[in-house]
Amino acid sequence: MTTAYCVKCKAKQEMKDPKEIVMNGKGGTKRRAMKGECPKCGTKMFRILGKAD
């Protein structure tokens, strides 16, 4: 599972239902990211991974 920082809980949590997405980065590059939910409070969580190929 993927961990990310929950802003509402103010702690690192394991993401619930993580999904990998691709977003547009600076200069037209593609960036990978993980998107999910906090298992405790249900807030959306987001973690930027790196460049997509």
Image (cartoon, rainbow, N blue to C red):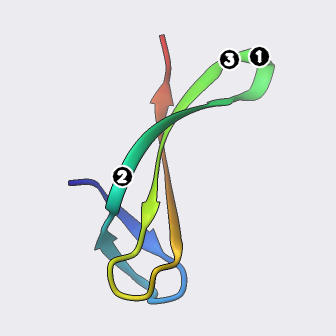
Local packing at callout 2 (Cα closer than 10 Å; few below 14, some 14-19, many 20+) is some
SS at mark 3? Answer: loop
Question: CA–CA distance between discs 2 and 3?
Answer: 23 Å
Instruction: Return the x and y of residue 34 as percentages of the image width and height.
Output: 44, 46
Question: CA–CA distance between discs 3 and 1?
Answer: 4 Å
Label number found at residue 29: 3
Q: Earlier in the sequence, mark 2 or mark 3?
A: 2
Q: Identify the residue under disc 1.
A: 28
Instruction: Return the x and y of residue 3 as percentages of the image width and height.
Output: 30, 61
Local packing at callout 3 (Cα closer than 10 Å; few below 14, some 14-19, many 20+) is few
Of tags 1 and 2, which is closer to the observer?
A: 2
Question: CA–CA distance between discs 1 and 2?
Answer: 25 Å
Of tags 2 and 3, which is closer to the observer?
A: 2
Residue 13 picture quarter: bottom left
Three-letter code, disc 2:
Pro
Viewer-proximal residue among 27 and 21: 21
Three-letter code, disc 3:
Thr
Query: Residue at horizontal 32%, vertical 65%?
Result: 16
Q: Earlier in the sequence, mark 1 or mark 2?
A: 2
Q: Residue furthest top?
A: 53
Three-letter code, disc 1:
Gly
Viewer-proximal residue among 51 and 19: 19
Q: In the displayed structure, does residue 1 sit left or right of residue 36? A: left
Q: Looking at the image, is 41 positioned above or below residue 34?
A: below
SS at mark 1? Answer: helix
Local packing at callout 1 (Cα closer than 10 Å; few below 14, some 14-19, many 20+) is few
Instruction: Return the x and y of residue 31 as percentages of the image width and height.
Output: 57, 28
Label number found at residue 18: 2
